[in-house]
Amino acid sequence: MFPLKDAEMGAFTFFASALPHDVCGSNGLPLTPNSIKILGRFQILKTITHPRLCQYVDISRGKHERLVVVAEHCERSLEDLLREGKPVRDMLNWLNLDFIT
C-alpha cells in the first residue's frame, strides 16, 4: 500500500439487495447472498495500486446485507488536479493497459 500523503481514511456503507429466503438455485442448494458475492469480488479491488489512485483498504459485512467499505479519501478531485496541471496521462494509460478491456 502506498503512503497516504494528503489522503485520509474514509468509510461508507451500503446494503446489498437481499434474496428471498425460500429461493434455491437450479442445483437445489440455497443461493449465495449478494453481500458474500461482493466480498469475494472486493478482494480484486484491494489489489489495485497506483500512486494517483485512492486504494480500497477493507470491507466488512454486517447484519441484513450491510457492507462497510474502508478506503483512502482525497479532498481534491480529479478536476482540481487537472486545473493544477498534474499529469494524468500515465494513469489513464495504466488503466487502459491493465484493467479496461
Image (cartoon, grey):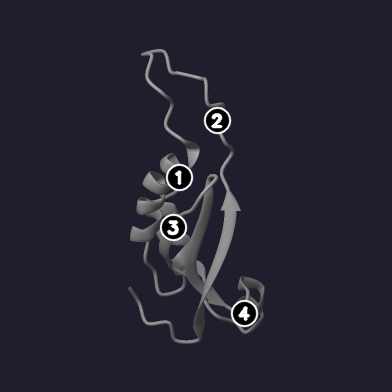
Q: Residue at x 43, y 68 (%)?
A: 55
Q: Position of residue 73 (x, y in %)?
A: 54, 74
Q: Which residue is mark 4?
A: 76
Q: Which residue is mark 3?
A: 60
Q: Residue type at mark 4?
A: Arg
Q: Residues within 10 Å of mark 2 (few under 14, many from 20)?
A: some
Which badge, 3 or 1, comes first in the chain's sequence?
1
Q: Residue type at mark 3?
A: Ser
Q: Secondary structure at mark 4?
A: loop
Q: Secondary structure at mark 3?
A: strand
Which badge, 3 or 2, comes first in the chain's sequence?
2
Front one among 13 and 98: 13
Estimate the spatial distance between the alpha carbons at disc 2 and disc 4, rounded to whole Å. Answer: 38 Å
Q: Residue at x 41, y 13 (%)?
A: 26
Q: Which residue is mark 1?
A: 38
Q: Which residue is mark 2?
A: 19
Quadrant position of the N terminus in the picture: bottom left
Q: Are marks 4 and 3 in contact (CB under 8 Å)?
A: no
65 to 49, vertically: above or below: above
Front one among 22 and 12: 22
Q: Position of residue 29 (x, y in %)?
A: 37, 19
97 to 35, vertically: above or below: below
Q: Are marks 3 and 2 in contact (CB under 8 Å)?
A: no
Estimate the spatial distance between the alpha carbons at disc 3 and disc 2, rounded to whole Å. Answer: 19 Å
Quadrant position of the C terminus in the picture: top left
Q: Are marks 3 and 1 in contact (CB under 8 Å)?
A: no
How many numbered discs? Answer: 4
